[in-house]
Amino acid sequence: MRIRIIGTCSWLVVFAGVLTTSISTQHLAAQDELPGVSLGLVYANRYLPALALQPFVGVFGEDMIASQVEAIVGRDLRNSNQFEVIDSLPDAMVGSQVDYTLWDRLGAVWLVTGEIEVSGDGYILTVELHDVVYGEMRDRGRFRLPSQDDEDFRMSVHRTSDEIVRWATGAPGMAASRIAFTMVGNDGNKEVYVIDSDGEDLRQVTDYNSLTESPTWSPDGSRLAIASYKTGVPRIYEVDRFGNELSALPAVRGAGDYVTPAYHPDGNTLAFSVFGSNSQSGIFTYDLAQNCCLSFLSGGPWYDVSPTYSPDGRWLAFNTLRFGDAVPQVMMMPAEGGSAETLSPYEYGGGGFYAAPDWSPNGDLVAFHGRIDRRGRYHILVINLDDGGRVLRQLTSEGNNEAPSWAPDGRHLVFAGERSWGFGLMVVDVTTGRLRTLLSGRRVDLPDWSPVIPPA
């Protein structure tokens, strides 16, 4: 995960980057001229097909649960930014037969119908996706849901929503996922929290009564690696999603602060940064499966921090201060170490502040935040590696915006933000520029979006 460097003394002072922003679908002009870089691209006016949700029905009196499930699915489909969702329709629209002519008159391209029935101690949700234009059912699935008091109930409904997205678009969804982040509680301590992709089910994960930073999800979504000061010295711990400690990374190389962990896509290797070591500081890896084998990748008389792996595991992007403490930049190197190239728009002797890289699960994009004007405000930027890393898209246009993290669908980013109304956790759709607030009124840091959460 990522940190923002604000100063150094006997130990490195780190804290989470905060961001908030309002996204315009119009042209975002760059405030500064960056040689060879195009900033502020236009969001395309993409056509979004209308998708209608026929009111879900409950068999043998399960209408209330059917309505609740329909509401979750409707919100998920709207959050996907793949459709213009038509829901909250009158019950008169419910019928045993789908009238394609009627739905066509309402402007629907897709129609989703749902029926729920009791099965054992849970439910069976039957969902159909209809192609209104061609007048035919496109896909049908039966999904098992646990009882409403089961903690996996909402996540099971989210998985259904993701399958509807896949049916209609061929692309993965992101509803069945969670976001981990840090937040200062009422007791003044910074702990790790998680929240569902729709902003529901906020939970505290750690209770260390200390400073806890940089939560990052394992590739299977079952674990979190975190950096905590709970013993007085920053060390890296693995916990499950409930906060139960699974392991602690041993201090196998003398002194130094261990921070900013990141999992390799295989889940067996952890990259992280070591500060202030008596022997060597920089980016290291540790073999979790063998519980051994610290390997040095990059570093020197500067700080290299916040590694993030490409989805194929071949590359690492990271933050560096090798060009000067005042001009942190984003670089990329082979995952086993070696020569690094600069991704952020830096020219020798120039300025710019770029930090907190995160690699898209699709492999073609790297997001980070950067200061592109002289007013000290940070915006979310995305580099397209297929374009040689020379085209930057600016995704935010106001406020302060930091520490982006990709959703598992590769088209949404969560970030921490600051606006005139305060602080919050926000999500932006990279394709349309649509923005939604996930959590408002709280100062949050360093969010990390999980992969799709498998069934429990």
Image (tube, rainbow, N blue to C red):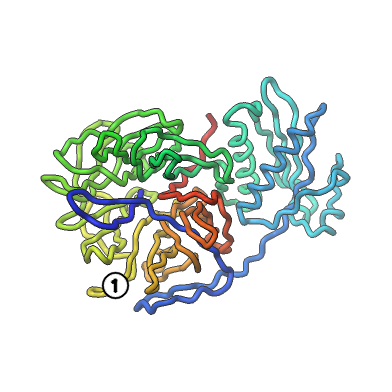
Image quadrant in which you'd find residue 224: top left
Image quadrant in which you'd find residue 66: top right
Circle 1: is it few (<14), some (14-19), or many (20+) Cα within 10 Å? Answer: some
Residue 7: horizontal and vertical position, in percent? 25, 57
Give the labeled residue for mark 1. Answer: 351
Q: Is residue 124 above or below residue 274?
A: above
Residue 210: horizontal and vertical position, in percent? 34, 38
Residue appearing at x 29%, y 65% in the figure:
342
Residue 347 left/right relative to 205: left
Residue appearing at x 65%, y 49% in the figure:
77
Image quadrant in which you'd find residue 278: top left
Q: Nearer the viewer, residue 343 or 210?
A: 210
Residue appearing at x 22%, y 65% in the figure:
324
Residue 168: horizontal and vertical position, in percent? 66, 51
Residue appearing at x 65%, y 30% in the figure:
145
Question: Which residue is most to the left?
Answer: 279
Amino acid type, residue under disc 1 in the picture: Gly
Residue 96 left/right relative to 245: right
Question: Which residue is most to the right?
Answer: 92
